[in-house]
Amino acid sequence: MAVNRTLVICKPDAVERGQVGEIIGRFERKGLQLVAAELRTLGPDVLALHYAEHVGKDFYDDLVAFMGRGPVLVAVVEGPHDTWSVVRQMLGATDPMKAAPGTIRGDLGTEVTENLVHGSDSAESARREVAIFFPGLQ
Ligand code: DAT
Ligand code: MG
């Protein structure tokens, strides 16, 4: 996979609240393009792969219950360079109460678990996560 691609997940709260268009629209307005996107309901096994670094932490069970409670939009977005970093800057801090205004979490969220959207946190994470969700993507 090219390093200018990254994984985005619009989480169940974003789908329930009808904010998927707002979130994907922000990435499109920034100049990123959708390469793949699908609504899926994620089970515990794929979540344990995706969130391997968090398995066993005190918030892990709440995270899996939340992420699996309804459909998410799993997407791959592409840009000219360092797309994972562009997306992370647009997401804002993990805790929406600490995320700056103008960021997606800062503008749309108030809860640390229900923080609307996931973005890969490095080029290596982007490669790993895209391969989990879209193994056939060229
Ligand atoms: P990010 O999603 O910003 O990469 P992360 O990888 O540290 O953050 O954590 C993954 C998700 O787990 C995060 O989006 C929300 C949840 N989470 C993280 N820290 C938490 C905490 N201290 N309490 C509750 N949920 C937390
Ligand atoms: Mg993370």
Image (cartoon, rainbow, N blue to C red):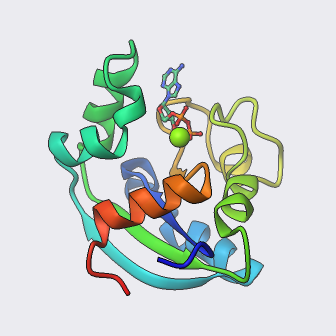
The x and y percentages for residue 111 are 56, 30
Residue 22 image-quadrant placement = bottom right
Q: Single out the residue that lies furthest toward the top.
A: 58
Left or right relative to 51: residue 115: right
Residue 100 image-quadrant placement = top right
Residue at (22, 52) in percent of width and height: 42
Residue at (49, 67) in percent of width and height: 20
Quadrant where the C terminus sits is bottom left
Residue at (29, 70) in percent of width and height: 39
Left or right relative to 66: residue 89: right
Q: Nearer the viewer, residue 138 or 74?
A: 138
Q: Nearer the viewer, residue 5 or 104?
A: 5
- 128 over 51 or under it: above or below: below
- 25 over 20 or under it: above or below: below
Residue at (63, 36) in percent of width and height: 94
Q: Nearer the viewer, residue 101 or 2?
A: 2
Left or right relative to 21: residue 68: left
The x and y percentages for residue 33 are 59, 86
The x and y percentages for residue 56 are 32, 17
Q: Single out the residue that lies furthest toward the right.
A: 101
Residue 90 image-quadrant placement = bottom right
